Image (cartoon, rainbow, N blue to C red):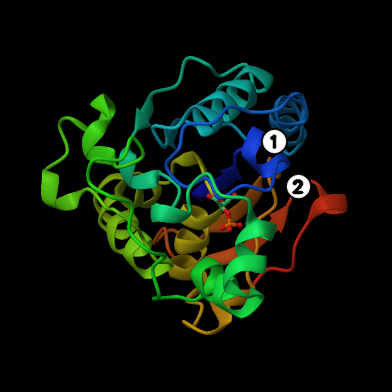
Amino acid sequence: MPQLALIRHGQSEWNLQNRFTGWVDVDLTDEGVAQARRSGELLAKAGFKPQRAYVSVLKRAIRTLNFTLEGLDRLWIPVEKSWRLNERHYGALAGLDKDETRAKHGADQVKIWRRSFDTPPPPVAEDHEFHPANDDRYADVPRELLPAAESLKLTLDRVEPYWTSEILPHLKKGETIAVAAHGNSLRALVKLLFRVGDAEIMEVEIPTGNPLLIDLAEDGTTILGARYLDESRAQPLPPLP
Ligand SMILES: O=C(O)[C@@H](CO)OP(=O)(O)O
């Protein structure tokens, strides 16, 4: 039967500093590295043997995947990197302190920017260093696909085609797959897999560096069971569809 582990990167420097991050390529903290190593240990203990892995093009997720695969002694498996698994683009909020932004714009507005399904934050300027058009790694991505800011809905709009065309076919073959990504690109996948409503997804949070292990039926989409492997840092999961 297919099995899927969704792994949010370990704690990043800007998670620790409480700053909006999005597509900014910040690194893991020492604690984030420890969480990533622990992710490998927990998956090994659960008997998880991934045959392939998918990851964003941001180092906090790539390094988390590498530590995880090292713990599993499976650094050899094929790994595909895609911008489509990146964190949601935080637009003009990227780099700002979350508490200072609340003080300036109000907690309600910040909650809407952070957790509403379809309200994107204000866009980043085209000539700003945080606009993806100014970053080499996106040179091959068609310009019209590069976001200046993303809501969760816009994130899901670019995650879903990748899920359907690249990941799902392998699950349908019965493979075991690891996906290392980000709080909001994984919330998008959880919304899709658990069929969470637009309002309900606001309350779903995914802890850093804590693998969510999902057992799937042969169709690769029906969830048979799901659990966080580090129970001490688990968050409530949506009900099974
Ligand atoms: O800053 C970010 O990119 C994300 C994830 O850390 O934050 P939030 O919790 O606001 O979605």
Residue drawn where x is 82% and y is 52% of the image: 233
Task: State the mark number for residue 43.
Answer: 1
Kind of element beneath mark 2 = loop
Kind of element beneath mark 1 = helix
Q: Position of residue 106 (x, y in %)?
A: 62, 75
Q: Nearer the viewer, residue 190 or 86?
A: 86
- Against 113, residue 228 (above or below) is above
**Numbered-mark total:** 2
Q: Is mark 2 within 8 Å of ligand 1?
A: no
Q: Can you tell which quarter of the image residue 63 is in? A: top right
Task: State the mark number for residue 226.
Answer: none
**Residue 53 left/right relative to 45:** left
Q: Nearer the viewer, residue 77 or 155?
A: 155
Q: Residue furthest right?
A: 232
Task: State the mark number for residue 229.
Answer: 2
Q: Position of residue 105 (x, y in %)?
A: 57, 71
Name which residue type carries label 2.
Leu
Residues under numbered marks 1 and 2 in contact, where contact means CB atoms less than 8 Å apart:
yes
Q: Can you tell which quarter of the image residue 160 is in? A: bottom left
Residue drawn where x is 80% and y is 46% of the image: 230
**Residue 50 left/right relative to 81:** right
Q: Position of residue 23 (x, y in %)?
A: 42, 42
Name which residue type carries label 1.
Leu
- Against 238, residue 199 (above or below) is below
Q: Residue furthest front?
A: 104
First in residue order: circle 1 vs circle 2: 1
